[in-house]
Amino acid sequence: GVSWGGGFSNPLSSQPPDFAAEVVNGKGNPVLISFVKPKSWKVSTNTGIAIQDYVTTDSAYVLVAPAKGGALDPKDLLDKVFDIKGRYGTFGKIDNVKVSKERTLAEGNSQYLYLDFKFTSLSPGGREIDRNACLKATVVDGDAVMLVASSNSNRWNKVKDTIAASVTSFAVVPTPKTELKGGQVESEIGNKAALGVAGYDLLRYDSPVWTN
């Protein structure tokens, strides 16, 4: 994979398809997050790890939340995805979430939960927008780490295979904590001086960046 240099994404710039970032979680352990983005999407790490097609608003982002009982509970994960303090709750509470498919697969030494679901989001002006979405999640050190992707429902059939390929590529792997790292990994995710949080904390479902 290719390590990302951080910051805003330029809609006109070219980016490698492979994304990888090492962050230090709440227990001080380094974790490698990686995925392959769709060709036309751009990565931004200014307010977390987000990827988006700036023309169509198809998008995805990495989210971290406590894993209820250390397990991958679908309802609990979706509660965190749609928490009023989070990214999707920015413009109002979302209640009408319907899961259409659920499966758990072993990949390497990890178990991953896949969910397909539908919901109605709110635009900045309060207009309702139907969206289809999917996520892939695993548990590392008691936290669920997931990639959540969505598109407007009227585009879903055109982009679902592209989105599925990116979500399927998502992986979260604990990495060795060496003396050289010392638990201090510069992830280049966010700007703590400007936002108050950075790195792993910026990925949390209730990061203050969405409510401040």
Image: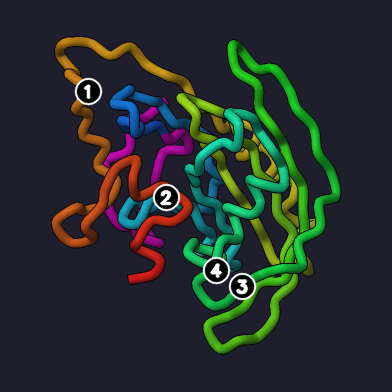
Quadrant position of the N terminus in the picture: top left
Q: Quadrant of residue 57?
A: bottom right
- Range drawn in magenta: 1-19
First in sequence: mark 3 vs mark 2: 2
Sequence-wise, which precedes: disc 4 or disc 1? 4
Q: CA distance from mark 3 to mark 4?
A: 5 Å
Residue marked by disc 4: 89
Instruction: Confirm or deny contact between disc 2 and disc 4 (CB under 8 A).
Output: no
Residue 153 occupies quadrant: bottom right
Q: CA distance from mark 3 to mark 2?
A: 26 Å
Q: Is mark 4 in CB contact (under 8 Å) with mark 1?
A: no
Q: Earlier in the sequence, mark 2 or mark 4?
A: 2
- From the viewer's perspective, is 33 left or right of 117? left
Q: Nearer the viewer, residue 192 or 164?
A: 192
Q: Nearer the viewer, residue 20 or 18?
A: 20
Question: Residue 40 magenta-drawn?
Answer: no
The residue at which mark 2 appears reads as 43
Q: Residue at x 81, y 51 (%)?
A: 99
Quarter of the rendering occupied by the C terminus: bottom left
Side of 45 relative to 131 (left or right): left
> Gap between marks 1 and 3, in whole Å?
37 Å
Which SS class for mark 1?
loop
Q: Can you tell which quarter of the image residue 206 is in?
A: bottom left
Element assignment for label 2? strand
Q: Which residue is mark 3?
A: 93
* Mark 1 vs 3, N-terminal side: 3
Residue 135 visible? The answer is: yes
Q: In the picture shown, does residue 89 fall above or below 10?
A: below
Distance between the Cα atoms at labels 2 and 4? 21 Å
Q: Amino acid at mark 3?
A: Lys
Circle on res. 183: 1
Residue 175 at x, y percent in the picture:
37, 16
